[in-house]
Amino acid sequence: MQIGNREHQRYTHFLDVVLESSSGKIEARISEIGLGGCYVDTIVTVYEGDEVFFHLGPPFDENLRFAGTVAYVFPGMGFGIKFNDIDTGPFRERLKQAGYYKEWRTKVGDEAWAALEKSTGPLA
């Protein structure tokens, strides 16, 4: 379990996902997300080291699938995913469509938001 040794900060934000694992394909919810991974709330059984795939939504684009590896599991509650080489362009676009960055702008204020967009490009 590698919760305390994260490379990137995670932030609370709820996103619906379609999750594909060895247990099958289900709809679930991400409750925390960051550049390096996320936490999925679900009762689905997975194991540390399992590879999982997910689609952010809604709407769910079957052609836009992201991959990760299960980093830790809280049986019956959920699990943490470490992202596997995600192409940040499409990933950021899906987060933008889901309203992820809009919520951030409200939290950090216009001045900090402008500085962020100066280094990343338009986010909202």
Image (tube, grey):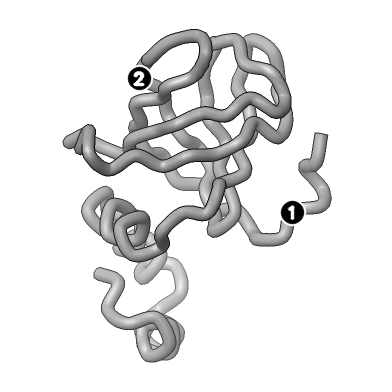
| Residue in view at x 54 percent, y 43 percent | 32
The secondary structure type at the circle numbered 2 is: strand
Q: Earlier in the sequence, mark 1 or mark 2?
A: 1
Residue 78 located left or right of residue 30: right
Residue 104 located left or right of residue 70: left
Rendering coords of residue 18 (x, y %): 34, 26
**Residue type at the position of mark 2:** Glu
Rendering coords of residue 25 (x, y %): 38, 15
Rendering coords of residue 93 (x, y %): 27, 59
Q: Quadrant of residue 99?
A: bottom left
User: How far separated are the C-alphas under marks 1 and 2?
Assistant: 26 Å
Q: Quadrant of residue 59?
A: top left
| Residue in view at x 55 percent, y 39 percent | 68
**Residue type at the position of mark 1:** Arg
Residue 48 located left or right of residue 65: right
| Quadrant showing the C terminus | bottom left
The secondary structure type at the circle numbered 1 is: loop
Q: Which residue is mark 1?
A: 6
| Residue in view at x 45 percent, y 46 percent | 13
Out of 30 and 52, give the one closest to the viewer.
52
Q: Which mark is residue 90?
A: none
Is there CB contact under 8 Å for labels 1 and 2? no
| Quadrant showing the N terminus | top right
Rendering coords of residue 118 (x, y %): 38, 90
Out of 106 and 54, give the one closest to the viewer.
54
Out of 48 and 101, give the one closest to the viewer.
48
Out of 35 and 12, give the one closest to the viewer.
35
CA neighbours of label 1 inside 10 A, class few (<14), some (14 to 19), many (20+): few
Q: Does residue 16 sit above or below 45 in this rendering?
A: below
Q: Quadrant of residue 75?
A: top right
Q: Which residue is mark 2?
A: 27
CA neighbours of label 2 inside 10 A, class few (<14), some (14 to 19), many (20+): few
